[in-house]
Image (tube, rainbow, N blue to C red):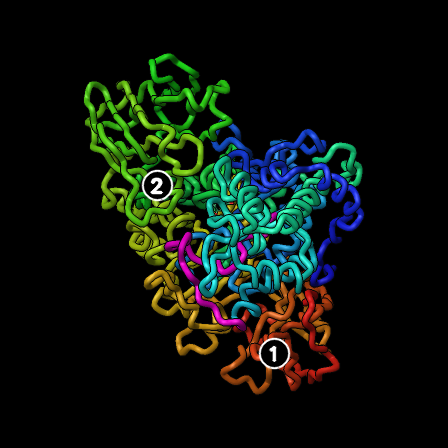
Amino acid sequence: MSRHPNFIPPITEQRGAEYAPIIESLLAALDLEDKTVLLSGQDLWSLPALPKIGLRSLVMSDGPVGVRGVGWGADDPSLTLPSPTALAATWDPELAHRAGQVLAQEAHRKGVHVLLAPTVNLHRSPLGGRHFEAYSEDPLLTARIGAGYVNGVQEQGVAATIKHFVANDAETQRFTVNNQVGPRALRELYLAPFEEIIATARPWALMSAYNSVNGTTMTEHHHLQVQVLRREWGYDGAVVSDWLAARDTVRAIEGGLDIAMPGPLTIFGPALAAAVRAGEVAESTVDDAVRRVLLLAARLGLLADVAPAVPESARPVPPDGIATAHEIAARAMVLLRNQDRVLPLDPEAVGSIALIGRAARDARVLGGGSATVFPARIVSPLEGLWAALPTNVALTYAVGADPNEGFDLAATGFDLHAVLRAEDGAVLAEQPLTLARVRWTDTALPAEADFHALASVEFTGTFTPQETGPHVFGIGGLGRFRLTVGDRVLFDGMQETPEHADPFEALTAPPTPHGSAELEAGRPVTISLLNATPKAALGPIQGVSFTLAVQEPRLDDDTLIAEAVTAAAAAEVAVVVVATTTAQESEGSDRENLRLPGRQDELIARVAAANPRTVVVVNSGSPVEMPWREEVSAILVSWFPGQEGGAALADVLLGRAEPGGRLPTTWPVRLADAPVSLVTPTDGVLPYDEGIFIGYPAWQRLDVRPAYPFGHGLGYTDWHYENIVATAREVRVTLRNSGSRPGREIVQIYAGPVDADDSRPACRLAGFATATADPGETVEVDIPLAERIFQIWDETRGRWSTRPGPYLIRAGHSSTDPGLSTTVRVTATDQEEVTSAHP
Ligand code: BGC
């Protein structure tokens, strides 16, 4: 029972060339105004309709764990899958394919045509704030997962958008940073996933990044967007700017940008028409961009009487969304350590479990920023275990230590609604709030209220506290606010835009505290948060976004930890769920360190001292330091597991599912050991001085060892690798399930020159495959070798060049497992030099 190793689902029907005649005739019917308007967002998420050519408006939405839709609130929930690091940890392109299928179904449900995902930037440094939103430190694994996802999305007739092209690998000064990347690193690492996904899955859209590469901002990067992407790789999709990334009309259109987002004020539209009239831009350049937008529209079925690339009748029936979310979450979990096989827990034998941790009750299911969606339900670890355990098992819960040093959005105990008023005080609309947060675009205000008439928005209602004591209130968003709790005004003033703020500060910055009120449990108080400048906060984006947050009185951590230790000591097994916070893992900023926030490290050490069977569940999207890792029995990484995470966790803990994940990125012992920890530019420049050495190829050159290497992850059975046979094109591995349970193994193939010198990694991931077998069963897997593994980017000649010679081919459980190896001799004829797209 084994699947073909590099399973890539069928390439989506393209029909690119077939559309050419109709596109030409439609183009001929457009005047300059029409054309330039078509390249410019009409609002935050869409392009305008052009009824005169039968073109409907094209709607885009993030991405990548769910489809947010044009609204951005809890009132419009989205199926929420595990985050990208989790998806990559499955090492399973077929599962990524299914993820894409269910998201496309969500897109159809929400009227979205273009999904702004997947993110295929690399994990250059563990400090990257959007690490959780990218797949891996390895370009091949990134490409394979990304291609599966794109195929799944597009097979359903929805466009996928690979992003952010290119080298958008950190968040600090992301709008302006100039990443200095050498040609080899650019080709062999950062461009590689884009290149392979374009070759194998043909995404219909690509997003141009905020940053510069080697001095040119990406939306204007003629060499990368025109020379490499279009001419060399033959990319025929549309290039859309990241939101607010397009800066200069002439340079952007000539640099290969097709669509400037968001609108309505962009550098295209009337500004582009004027540039053409002034002779600064050739109309033929505009025509080329329009052709690509019309091709995208044609593929999506947005042109009247033009068949879409994937007609409804040709779309496969997508899998069930909730079941897929559940399956990915379980398959993604990485068992880092399992002393004395403490896991899986036997529900018939274990008498009592102490479940500990704030995140066990209030699960962290996704990361922050544009990836945020609102799930209709969340299964927490507490709910998951509670539902899964037989009634004879005593399950106790203790908070332990609260990692959340910040705020929670006002929800529990709050009975609020938003009142939208005009200048004269007339009420334009009212909307109940389940969560004290609004994010409205100008065209999607409640009750279709007129954005231009809007003068203020007030959250008003009551709050009934659960606890007695000081409650700290905070406001998220920018502009003039007045906050009243009971009869006290806690704040009346401006929340200013900080210096060097991200343009999306109003959306991504954590709430600012504004005083506290002494409140009594059960006694309601009135609340009012008046936003007197609701339209000013989002800079060039037209919309309204602000939040009310609260920090409830907390028991002090000493008491909480003591309670948890008592609970752990009284139970047979302690399960501690620890997590990062939204302030740590979010778009818009990088992490400052890799430590678990609050006193969670201390909590684990003390619980482990009280109970020798302590299992730690790490609920984070990216690596954390685990100073206690040798003191606990088991460590399971659950990532940001999506809405069904708690149910999946229960399955894995109780052995109903195998923890199928393998690390898609190296986890260091401490940040100081990581090969790349510089994410802060100096004078606007971030040098990628490490060149081609990031991730495990860099670790191989260090004296220090990581806590857990790339590819590591234990299952619940054992595998014996019996044989390896290789040519320069394919490896056959024979392995046996030597344990007592059915299992799943990710067979990883690494290859490197026998005489490795400093110019090339000693080994690189060359392929992988999933094997499944029953106890005692022997299976064979055939794994094609990626051609690029024997090549380097020849900087002098500007092309790929095969490096002949003997290569060590190794099959094993991880990047550091000696496994089984053999040698192949590569000659230039085995692996011809290629300069084209097919890796
Ligand atoms: C992010 C993109 C996202 C876009 C639209 C940007 O800030 O970088 O990934 O697709 O916003 O939300």
Residue 250 location (% of width, % of height)? 52, 51
Image quadrant of residue 605? bottom left
- Image point (52%, 81%), residue name: 759
| Quarter the N terminus occupies | bottom right
Image coordinates of residue 204 in percent, x first then y, are 66, 48
Please name whichever residue, 426 or 816, is drawn nearer the observer in this view of the structure: 426
Q: Position of residue 164 (x, y in %)?
A: 53, 53
User: Disc 2 on helix, strand or loop?
Assistant: strand
Q: Is residue 561 magenta?
A: no
Which residue is pictured at 19% across the width and 27% down the height?
Answer: 518
Residue positioned 54% across, 42% down in the render: 274
Residue 821 shows up from this direction: yes
Q: Is mark 2 within 8 Å of ligand 1?
A: no
Place of residue 610 in the rendered image (x, y in percent of width and height, measured from the top left): 32, 53
Q: What distance separates the C-alpha of mark 1 from that of mark 2?
A: 63 Å
Asked which quadrant contains residue 226, the reply is: bottom right
In this picture, is 691 found above or below 352?
below
Magenta residues span 161-184
Q: Is mark 1 within 8 Å of ligand 1?
A: no
Q: Amino acid at mark 1?
A: Arg
Whichever of labels 1 and 2 marks the residue nearer the N terminus, that label is 2
Residue carrying label 1: 797
Q: Which residue is mark 2?
A: 398
Q: Is residue 465 left or right of residue 315?
A: left
Mark 1 Cα within 10 Å, few/some/many (few <14, many 20+)? Answer: few
